[in-house]
Amino acid sequence: MNSSYWVESTPQTNYPNLSKDIDTDVLIVGGGITGILTAYMLSKSPLNISIVEADKMAMGVTANTTAKITSQHGLLYDYLLNSFGFDIAKGYLDSNEEAIKIIENIVKKENINCDFTKQDAYVYTCDKLSVQRIVDEVSSVTSLGLKAEYVTECPLPFPIEAAIKFPNQAQFHPRKYLLSLLPILEKRNVNIFENSKVIDIKHIKDKYEVYINGNKITTKYLVMACHYPIKNFPGMYFIKMYQESSYAIGVEVEEDVFDGMYISCDTPTTSFRNTTQENGKKLLIVGGGEHKTGATDVNIDDTYTNLENYIKSIYPKANIKYRWMTEDCVSLDKIPYIGEFSNFLPNMYVATGYKKWGMTTSHVAAKIISDKILGNENSYENIYTATRLEPIKNRKEFGNMLKTSIYSLAINKISPPIKSYTELKNDSGGVVNYKDKKLGIYKDNKGKMFAVIPYCKHLGCELSWNNLEKTWDCPCHGSRYDYTGKIITEPTTENLDTVDLE
């Protein structure tokens, strides 16, 4: 059941892995929505284009989204106006509105059946103390030229205090959309490789050498579209953003499902939308339970249960069909990093920090990066400049990141484990004392133990155990590994060291 509806309702891809050295003009690292759309936008040019994906195409974050296509990214625009001014806020709004049109045009042009439908999007509150925040957001958004509405009622099956309504937004099935684009890329001679994880990148003269599966790709242009940049220096994105985990359930209810897309501005945050399943029945998608990846100060064991209990308080006969989780990169100033990776690495580009709004932001990124490679002007690129060095707006979160990193890098390595491995119950794990050694151990349902050295291969932070997903999570930069030590999520590029307890 712990798989998204988007994955369960679509076939898996089966592209070859990289098995020999090749030369290409453009190498895109990452086969999610950003990588595929960047390749699509470049594919009519004379450039030779290749995509490498560590796992399967259109999986990862792309396959575990709520798939809302909207320029409404929470209560953001009042913050952008006050922090950056009119031009940045206006450009952010316009670029994401343009992204909605790009998606709609591609769907129509390529005749893609991906359940694309127009919907209104709402940010709502059930707390009287937050009404003023809604009022301020409506004022800011309308000043930027979008006809947002202040409402006190909406189609949700419970009363609200207030909401901001964005008209003419949209939703779709992300994997149906992307799986329809892949054959088009093949016809345009784009090389696609799966199970081809990048291990190392070298910049030599005016080229990049990218090492994968014991083979090498040489390229002039390199696009890092892999969620979190796997190259640490000189970009140093690990001090400019953090990763957040969140959860979703897919639910069938007997009652009519309401239209529209919704997210609360209250804590905890809750998100709603619906989709029509292959059997014709409506599926209500409910999201929430967000926390910083690897956090040790929150109890995540009951996250799905909490979501299920919440929706059953509204729909007592709700049938839980799907559960899934995802991880999102969040920049410290809340604006994604899109464009040149570093001033010291020409022709290398990055797209990250989408803060849960990747459906539109991925298209903004693909357009900016493809324009950069093709030598076209893009009026929005200065808004998202990835090399920006302005003073950090979110000083509190920056301080928290430093504190977490220092604690995990230094103090945790010399502190004793919390408990002995003998205290572990079946189907649980943790950093424990094993015969005077500090190990990360998971004990499965039958009592078999799997042991790892519990330090992230990215920059060495001590890992925390996620008993909900049975994963090892890094509290510093969000890398995740399964209980056997295999990589699930970057920025790490190496599996954990394992220990044979026998």
Image: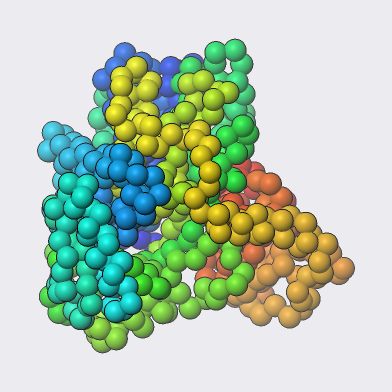
Q: Position of residue 81 (x, y in %)?
A: 33, 49
Question: Which residue is at a point 30% across and 83% down the rendered structure image?
Answer: 312
Q: Is residue 354 left or right of residue 387?
A: left
* Residue depicted at x 57% and y 31%: 212
- Asked whether residue 90 is in view, the answer is yes
Say which of 377 and 178 sits in front: 377
**Nearest the camera: 340 or 427?**
340
Quarter-wise, where is residue 262 in the image? bottom left
User: Outermost residue toward the right?
Assistant: 436
* Image location (x, y in percent) of residue 122: 22, 63
Which residue is pictured at 48% across the width and 21% down the height? 347
The foreground one among 482 and 106 is: 106
Residue 273 vs 202, above or below: the answer is below
**Rendered image quadrant of residue 402:** bottom right
Colouring method of the image: rainbow
Q: Is residue 421 left or right of residue 51?
A: right
